[in-house]
Image (cartoon, rainbow, N blue to C red):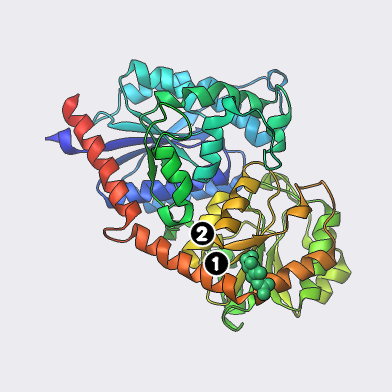
Amino acid sequence: MSDSVVHVALFPSAGIGHLNPFLRFAALLVQRHCQVTLITPLPTVSLAESELISRFCSAFPQVNQIQFHLLPVDDATVNSTDPFWLRFEAIRRSAHLLSPLLASLSPPLSAVVSDISLFSSLVPITDSLCLATYILTPSSSKMFSFFSYFPNLLASRKSIPPLLCVPNSLFENIFKEDSPKITKLNGVLLNTFEVAEAQTLEALNGVKVVKGLPPVFSLGPFVPCEFEGRDQLGAILTKWLDDQPAGSVVYVGFGSRTALTRNQIREIGDGLMKSGHKFFWVVKDKLVDRDDEEGLDEVLGHELMESMKKQGLVVKTFVDQAAILGHKAVGGFVSHCGWNSVMEAAYHGVPILAWPLHGDQMINAEVVETIGLGMWVRSWGWVGETVVKGAQIEEAIKEMMGNESLRLKAAELKEAGRKAIGIGGSSEVTLNRLIDEWKKKNRST
Ligand SMILES: *[C@@H]1O[C@H](CO)[C@@H](O)[C@H](O)[C@H]1NC(C)=O
């Protein structure tokens, strides 16, 4: 009887950017009557993650949560000081503890889906349990293609994440060690869709990138879910946005992961003011939200705060970004191009001014530019390379907000994205194929 119950364990890594696609994917699986077990490595680094997990678990009580308590790691043995990467490493080093937990689940698992940064520590376990293993990547298929090709990569290109150019850094080691092991996976799941990344997806599935690559399933754009919404900010923000004309507001948000310097933050404030556009701006000046104690007045300066009141709304809290992008008043998005943000912008048809700061973001910005979802001022470089001046920001914002062809292209992508996940669309068909594959696995074991 239970052989048709698809039971999938999901294993996300640290940071909202890695957690968010897993929770949206979990919601998709629940809708399709799959049994889901969510492995949550604890403690989380940020408060935002732990809050999102609890909202998810209340919204989906049928999901089985495994609270995965990590072994302590001596930070001196890890070549990084970034709290999120230290946590990646801690999860990798604790992964062997999952073996008995995974083996004892009932009904037996059809598949395990892990974050891309964890899979190599998981594969020995899933191998010994004869479990099919997949990864869900939190980035573009272009970034995945780069990852899978990394060992072969000799020439350096401008978009290569600077971290990967630091010999022996934690990140370079993960790439070097894990990339060749991709061939051990049963599949790679991506939050993207055919129209957005046609060429790369075709190359990946046509074995043009690396021999022996497992099949790639594009399942996006993942739909933002209700449980993600937070009420605290809701009323004030919604009222403010409701009062603005359609498409008039610039939304500025650089994700949950990057803190900018005070200097750069003030230049952004200056640029926004000079642009003359209304704006909603999420300021982040600490890497981890738990450390963030200063008020906006201190970060921006009292004078700038006062002068901005007529033109914009500024907050320093984690926001329900997808809901903001979905509001009709929002007409442009200044974004770091974290992939979740890019897919949310595509889903809602909002043009992007790409300002990639680190990691995979330049590669994602290339995608944004290529598909016409947004514009990118390449000379701004990586975060911290230069201070981008208010006048430059002003000019770029004016161009993004005034460019009709960008607006039309973004609207087309919105249509294409919704078609992809609708009945009979490419992503929907792919998801059904994946679930069927899992059903077959149940029968063969
Ligand atoms: C609008 O944006 C597109 C894409 O970035 C660009 O090619 C085009 O030149 C822009 N048009 C104007 C009038 O700036």
Location of residue 341 with respect to 130 vertically, above or below: below
Residue that appears at 56% across and 61% down:
321
Q: Is disc 2 placed on a helix, strand or loop?
A: helix
Q: Position of residue 30 (x, y in %)?
A: 30, 48
In the rendered structure, find residue 325 and report the number of the disc placed on it.
Answer: 1
* Quarter of the picture holding the N terminus: top left
Locate residue 423 relative to residue 333 in the image: left or right.
left
First in residue order: circle 1 vs circle 2: 1
Residue 217 lies in quadrant: top left
Residue 308 lies in quadrant: bottom right
| Residue closest to the eye, 341 or 256 | 341
Q: CA distance from mark 1 to mark 2?
A: 7 Å
Q: Position of residue 378 (x, y in %)?
A: 73, 54
| Residue closest to the eye, 214 or 314 | 214
Q: Which residue is mark 2?
A: 344
- Visible residue check, residue 152: yes
Q: Position of residue 184 (x, y in %)?
A: 40, 23
Residue 265 lies in quadrant: bottom right
Q: Is mark 2 within 8 Å of ligand 1?
A: no
Location of residue 85 with respect to 259 vertically, above or below: above
Q: Residues within 10 Å of mark 1 (few under 14, many from 20)?
A: many
In the rendered structure, find residue 67 and report the number of the disc placed on it.
Answer: none
Q: Is disc 1 placed on a helix, strand or loop?
A: helix
* Quarter of the picture holding the C terminus: top left
Q: Tell me whether the residue at label 1 lies in contact with that at label 2, contact meaning CB atoms closer than 8 angstroms.
A: yes
Type of amino acid at the residue the image marks with label 2: Glu
Q: Position of residue 370 (x, y in %)?
A: 57, 56
